[in-house]
C-alpha cells in the first residue's frame, strides 16, 4: 500500500508542479493524453470494475442504482469543478465573478472541495471488491488512476489561476489535493480492516465511483471531438488506451 500511496501522490503533485514550468501547453499532445487516459479509464471500468461489482452483489438492481447515482453525482459536482476532473482547461464559467471577492472565494472553495472529494473517492476505489475478498493489488486500476491524475492535476492548477491565489498558495493547495486520493486509499483500508461498514456499503461506494468514471471518460470523448469529427491520431490513442486496459486486466499486470 505504501508504494501505491507514493505513486498516486507523486504523479499528481509532480504533474501539477510541472504546470508552473510550462510556457505554452501543446494542445494537440494534451488532447492525445486525454484521449488515451479517458479511453483507459472507460475500458477498465467496463471490463474490470462493473463485472466485479455485479459478481459480488446479490442484487444487480442495487449496483445499477448506485452506478447511476455516481454518474449524476459527478454531473452535479462539475457545476463547481468546471470540468477539472476530466482535464478541462478552458476558461471557467465563474471568472466573471472576479470583481466580487466574496463570490470568488465561494466558487474557489467550492471547486477545491468538490475536486478533492472526487479525488478522495478515487483513492477509496483501490479497495474494490477483489480487495475486500483477497486484499490483493490490482495494477490495472492503479495505472488507470495514475493516468487520470496527470491531466486532472494540470487542470486543477490551471483552475487555481482563475482565482486570486499566489504561487505559494497554489503549491500548498496542490499538495493538499495530491494527498486526497492516497488518503482515500488509506481510509478505505482502515475502515475495511475495522469492519466498520458492511460489504453492501462498500459495494455501493465502489458503484458510485464507477459511475463517476463513466461520466468522466465519456465526457472526455465528447469534449475531444466537439464537432463530431474524430481525428485518426485521437482514435488511435483511444483504441490503444482501451486495448492496454483490457490486456493489463487480462494478464493481471
Image (cartoon, helix red, strand yellow):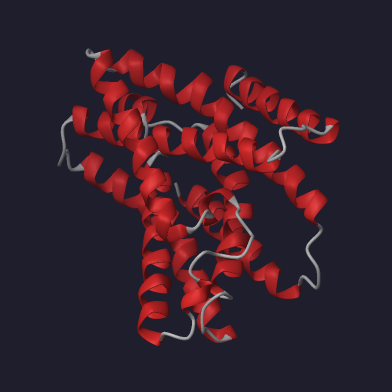
Residue 212 is situated, as x and y percent measured from the top left of the image, at 42, 39
Residue nearest the observer in this picture, 11 or 50: 50
- Height in image: 90 above or below 213? below
The residue under the point 58% across, 64% down is 13
Residue 7 is situated, as x and y percent measured from the top left of the image, at 57, 52
Instruction: Decide if residue 119 is in sight here.
Output: no
Residue 186 is situated, as x and y percent measured from the top left of the image, at 35, 51
- Height in image: 10 above or below 220? below
Direction from residue 95 to residue 247 in the image, left or right: right
Direction from residue 203 to residue 82 in the image, left or right: right
* Rendering quarter of residue 154: bottom right
Residue 15 is situated, as x and y percent measured from the top left of the image, at 65, 61
Residue nearest the observer in this picture, 39 or 104: 104
Instruction: Decide if residue 57 is in sight here.
Output: yes
The residue under the point 64% across, 70% down is 17
The residue under the point 81% across, 50% down is 28
Amino acid at each position: 500500500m505504501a508504494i501505491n500511496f507514493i505513486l498516486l501522490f507523486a504523479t499528481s503533485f509532480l504533474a501539477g508542479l510541472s504546470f508552473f514550468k510550462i510556457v505554452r501547453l501543446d494542445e494537440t499532445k494534451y488532447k492525445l493524453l486525454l484521449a488515451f487516459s479517458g479511453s483507459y479509464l472507460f475500458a477498465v471500468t467496463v471490463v474490470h470494475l462493473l463485472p466485479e461489482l455485479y459478481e459480488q452483489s446479490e442484487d444487480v438492481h442495487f449496483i445499477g442504482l448506485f452506478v447511476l447515482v455516481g454518474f449524476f453525482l459527478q454531473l452535479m459536482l462539475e457545476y463547481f469543478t468546471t470540468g477539472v476532473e476530466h482535464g478541462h482547461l478552458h476558461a471557467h464559467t465563474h471568472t466573471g465573478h472576479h470583481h466580487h471577492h466574496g463570490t470568488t472565494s465561494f466558487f474557489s472553495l467550492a471547486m477545491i472541495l468538490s475536486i478533492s472529494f472526487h479525488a478522495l473517492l478515487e483513492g477509496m476505489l483501490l479497495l474494490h471488491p477483489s480487495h475486500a475478498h483477497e486484499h490483493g493489488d490490482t495494477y490495472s486500476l492503479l495505472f488507470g488512476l495514475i493516468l487520470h491524475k496527470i491531466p486532472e492535476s494540470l487542470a486543477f492548477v490551471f483552475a487555481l489561476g482563475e482565482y486570486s491565489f499566489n504561487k505559494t498558495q497554489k503549491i500548498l493547495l496542490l499538495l493538499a489535493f495530491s494527498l486526497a486520493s492516497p488518503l482515500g486509499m488509506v481510509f478505505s483500508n482502515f475502515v475495511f480492516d475495522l469492519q466498520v461498514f458492511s460489504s453492501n456499503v462498500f459495494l455501493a461506494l465502489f458503484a458510485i465511483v464507477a459511475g463517476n468514471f463513466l461520466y468522466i471518460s465519456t465526457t472526455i470523448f465528447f469534449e475531444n471531438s466537439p464537432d463530431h469529427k474524430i481525428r485518426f491520431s485521437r482514435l488511435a490513442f483511444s483504441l490503444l488506451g482501451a486495448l492496454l486496459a483490457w490486456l493489463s486486466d487480462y494478464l493481471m499486470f
